[in-house]
Amino acid sequence: MTGNHSSIDRSVRTSAPGSAPFSESDFLLQLGAAVRGARANAGMTRRELARRSGVSQRYIALIEAGKGNVSIVLLLRILNAFRDVVTKAA
């Protein structure tokens, strides 16, 4: 989980207060990259992440491409899917 969490942390740090404004499209692109990286670090396919999170494979692809305007609740479901994989691996 540490590898997954740090990629998301890096994205957040680049948009810290005092830095240049962060556009919605930039945010969605970075969020998508973070989800894609976390999925790769967990060794999961999109299909497996979709099954574990209850989010469709097509929507996960949109999120990873920076085109899905994802809700906080869907992000929580995706995060919990990653946590399940890490917990089982430990």
Image (cartoon, rainbow, N blue to C red):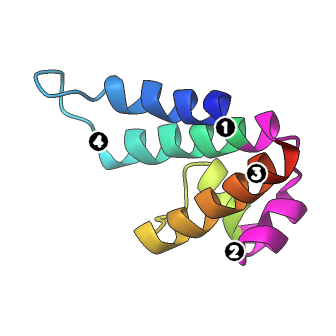
* Three-letter code, disc 2: Val
Instruction: Say what secondary structure mark 2 lies in.
Output: loop
Place residue 67 in its image quadrant. Answer: bottom right
Q: Callout 4: few (<14), some (14-19), or many (20+) C-alpha neighbours within 10 Å?
A: few
Q: Which mark is residue 87?
A: 3
Of the two numbered discs 1 and 4 in the rendering, the one whose residue sits closer to the viewer: 1
| Residue at mark 2 to residue at mark 4: CA–CA distance | 25 Å
**Disc 2 marks which residue?**
55
Residue 85 location (% of width, % of height):
80, 53
Q: Which residue is mark 1?
A: 1
Residue linked to disc 4? 23
Marks 1 and 4, how far apart at CA: 28 Å
Gap between marks 1 and 2, in whole Å? 20 Å
- Which comes sooner in the sequence, label 1 or label 2? 1
Query: Can you tell which quarter of the image residue 51 is in?
Result: bottom right
Is residue 35 one of those drawn in magenta? Answer: no
Which of the marked residues, 3 or 1, is nearer the chain's N terminus?
1
Q: Residue at 72% of width from left, 78% of height from top?
A: 54
Magenta stretch: give its range.
39-58
Q: Earlier in the sequence, mark 2 or mark 4?
A: 4
Mark closer to the observer (4, 3) = 3
Mark closer to the observer (1, 2): 1
Asked if the residue at tag 4 contacts the one at tag 1, i.e. Cβ–Cβ closer than 8 Å, the answer is: no
Q: Is residue 55 above or below residue 35?
A: below
Q: Is residue 26 left or right of residue 23?
A: right
Q: Quadrant of residue 3?
A: top right
